Amino acid sequence: MNKKPIYITTPIFYPNAELHMGHAFTVTLCDILVRYYRLRGHEVHFLSGSDEHASKIVRIAEKEGKKPAEFIDGIVEAFKKLYSDLDISYDQFIRTSDKETHWPGAQKLWNELVARGDIYKKSYRGMYCVGHEAFITEKELVDGKCPDHGTAPEMLEEENYFFALSKYTSILRDRIKNGTLTIEPASRRGEILSVLESAEGLQDVSFSRPAQKNSWAIPVPNDSSQTMYVWCDALASYITAIGYGRDEASFKKWWPASYHVIGKDILRFHAAFWPAMLISAGIGDALPRILVHGMITSGGRKMSKTLGNVVRPMDLIQEYGKDALRYFIAREIPTYEDGDMTPELFKAAYNASLANGLGNLANRIIVMALNYSVDLAKAPAMDEILADDAFAWYTSAFERETGPDINGAAQGVWSRIAAADLKIQQTEPFKLFKTDPEAARSIVSELLVELWTIAQLLTPFMPTTAAEIQSAIKEKRKPTLFPRK
Ligand code: MSP
């Protein structure tokens, strides 16, 4: 049977600074899902990218005395370096500055919105939060400042094209209610529904900026005095990347996205702007599923470049290894709620679950197998394992209707690790070997197959560790895993 192609996206990140722990969190969640679906035999397309036309990027480049393109190239290289250091198996990295891949589709999308009568020009005066790259209302401010960025908005007055988002209030509400616009978890869906059901509903949104203020952005078709506003440009990347306006066959194959994975900070753009744009452009019959994770806080506050409280993923990778960071993201941080991250929590989890838990178990089993000359009796492949009802918990966690339960799937693997530890404690093969070597060998043989199986199940979460355990078993040597810290 042909399995359906899976298309998973990360947000495209602003290349105004290196990626922090929060970004690494999103990207790693995506990578875990992607690797799971590849193991299940699906064809997968995994997209990430950079959102390069935001005004804050140009300001920062200028501050550093660099040309925007030169500055951005350097940051994009650093993004890709982190992806490689974290084993992020992306298939494509889209840059919104890419005039061949991205611009034609973004302009086609614009033209479709125009054709539907959903774009109009008007003069606008409002408060603009540069951190959000969006207009912000008086109501959203706390003490005159954006609560997320802690900065005061700027007053802007200009002539812009607007997108008639308000027209879509009831359409989106109906699509959420009839289940054809999926936003998970339910709490985030509720948040959007309450906007859609409020008296005001959705407001029309500014979709362009004057070209002289935003000269680097994508020109609005047929009006050289305006360039596209960053969100209209950025959201379009999800379809231009896979061929919209360029390669219809490829676009048809992958669209709609199986998951747009995002943080709650950009919920409204993805759960209101984007589906409305898709419906307006006539490509919204089947809509992408929106998966909204929580935010990692640092000392109880949102991690942000602006606040300066970022945790650098590179530091953790250097100290503990990439799979330790992947482990922490998968199991220790609640996927759909906010979670605080501190160096102390990280170290404690590392020692308990990796050095003592997984690492110790793998070492003990492999050393016993070497000492008692026990070979791997069978090496179950992933599809064999997953065809077994005993592993239904794993597939049902990953394929849960209400959004993948990454914590649950990881927790399930650690339950098996604990069960294998218990089996060693209870059967004491190292003692038994002295009196009944055959019985001891048979227990170690079972443990070795279990360790192999645990490694298979770990593959989406910790690909390097899984491979190291399996190679050590095959090559009959001790594995190199997680020294105590
Ligand atoms: N460029 C826009 C997105 C356009 S998508 C069409 C943008 N970029 S961003 O660089 O600010 O990245 C925002 C995303 O990074 C969040 O939605 C989330 O996925 C991730 N995170 C940023 N900070 C985070 C945390 N503190 N915790 C978890 N995820 C975080 O917005």
Image (cartoon, helix red, strand yellow):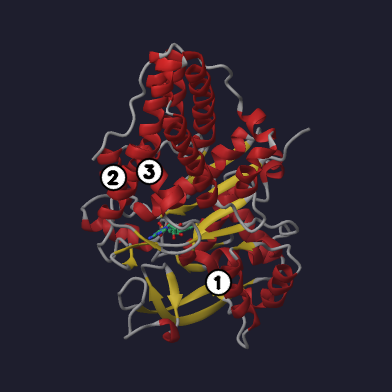
Question: Would you call the spot at circle 1 few (<14 residues within 10 Å), some (14-19), or many (20 or more)?
Answer: many
Q: Which residue is mark 2?
A: 316
Residue 65 sits above or below residue 201 on the image: above
Q: Which of marks 1 and 3 precedes in the sequence?
A: 1
Tell me which residue sits at (46%, 34%) in the image: 426
Is the C-beta separation of discs 1 and 2 under 8 Å? no
Q: Residue at x 61, y 25 (%)?
A: 381
Residue type marked 2: Leu
Q: CA distance from mark 1 to mark 2?
A: 45 Å
Task: Say which element carries label 1.
Answer: strand
Which marked residue is nearer to the observer: mark 3 or mark 1?
3
Eyeballing the image, is 274 above or below 345?
Answer: below
Query: Which amino acid is tagged 3?
Result: Ser
Q: Identify the mark nearer the N-term, 1 or 2.
A: 1
Front-most of 316 and 457?
457
Q: Sequence order check: which comes first, mark 2 or mark 3?
A: 2
Q: Relative to residue 460, is residue 396 drawn left or right?
A: right
Residue assigned mark 1: 161
Is 101 located above or below residue 116 in the figure? above
- In the rendered view of the protein, which quadrant contains the C terminus? top left
Residue wearing tag 3? 353
User: Which image quarter is the N terminus in?
Assistant: top right
The answer to whether residue 415 is seen in the rendering is yes
Is residue 186 shown left or right of residue 262? right
Determine the quadrant in which ligand 1 lies: bottom left
Query: Dot 2 surroundings within 10 Å: few (below 14), some, or many (20 or more)?
Result: some
Q: Nearer the viewer, mark 2 or mark 3?
A: 3
Q: Position of residue 297 (x, y in %)?
A: 35, 63
Examine the rendering and report whether any part of residue 243 can be seen: no
User: Between marks 2 and 3, how big is the CA–CA gap?
Assistant: 16 Å
